[in-house]
Image: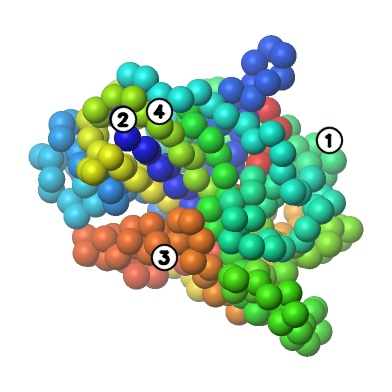
Amino acid sequence: MFVLRLIFSGLIALVPIVDQQGKEQGMTLLLLKADHHKPIVGMIVGQCVEGDCARPAGSTPQPAGSTPLGLYWKLVDEGLSLTLAKADRWQVPATTKLTGGCPLMHFPENVADTADRGWILRLDDLFPGKGKIDPDCLGERQHCPIVARFTVHNGQLSACHLVHGEMRTPTGTTLVMDDLEKPIDMVAAFSFGGTDLTPRAIADAVMVEIEVAAPYLELESRSMIDGSLTRAKLEPVDGKMTLVVSNNDFHRPPTGKHEHFEHYYELAQIPEANKVVPSYFGEIKLDPGSCENDLEEFEKKLDILGSDAVHNYRECDTLLFSP
């Protein structure tokens, strides 16, 4: 048995998989198409022992152990899934301290609170009743601007990193919050123009943790263009395995306004005039949350590969759609 950590960071939409009774049974994660974003899957803990372990676009399969990441795939028009011999079922938290657009708390009160699934912003928070995903994005993708899909049917989803920094008012005045005695750094205040949402923290990375009762798993990719398959057999190291699925901007530095956020609206056909984007007050500083060390390790190993990962700007927030 081992624990698999799937970390998703960047411009990635989350869509619950539900049964006929409306019960959540998994999650489809959509990596959006956007300028300068590079969709990548990399393994930072574990080993690829068989199959296609390193796959730059257009290259032939590489032998096992040929990359410092253990597994390194650049993604282009494909759907990914895991083959697990036996694993825990999909779990939905019974409670959350945040509810929709009116959270009971706007910023985490302690380190444990940063994992609350409620930090994942929902499209229904911005446009009540209009957060339903375009069916094309889950089907043949004829008109949906995505580059990859990752389907997960096991484990539990949580927020694992919140973008944050020095909290300021819109006029630039720093808010004094020392009396809150937070054991973590200040979380950035976000707001959306033209909405009534109170500034709040937002997740920019999420994690699915799965207990796997088997000695290995297989990662499978099927091309959305010709249906061809790519597989890799993956094994844990010391009872652990960590995969990072990244769709971040490798070109422009953060600007204080998340300009690529508006791409999410193309997945639900939100009118152009309503494409509000989140803005933060103050300079971003990354919080040492439950997956921050993993993301840093991922970026270091990308740099070893000689890519331009040194300019990987994690400025995109995740967004939860309705099924």
- Mark 1, secondary structure of its residue: loop
84 to 302, vertically: above or below: above
Q: Between disc 1 and disc 2, whose residue precedes?
A: 2
Q: Between disc 1 and disc 3, whose residue precedes?
A: 1
Q: Is there CB contact under 8 Å for labels 1 and 4?
A: no
Instruction: Determine which residue is flagged by label 3.
Output: 312
192 to 149, vertically: above or below: below
Crowd rating for badge 3 (residues with CA inside 10 Å; few <14, some 14–19, many 20+): many
Cα separation between marks 1 and 3: 34 Å
Instruction: Determine which residue is flagged by label 4.
Output: 81
Which quarter of the rendered picture does the N terminus lie within? top left
Q: Between disc 2 and disc 3, whose residue precedes?
A: 2
Extreme residue in the left direction? 63
Residue 142, percent across and down? 55, 28
Going by the numbered disc 1, the residue's amino acid type is Gly
Cα separation between marks 1 and 2: 41 Å
Residue 282, percent across and down? 66, 79
Q: Is there CB contact under 8 Å for labels 1 and 2?
A: no
Instruction: Determine which residue is flagged by label 1.
Output: 129
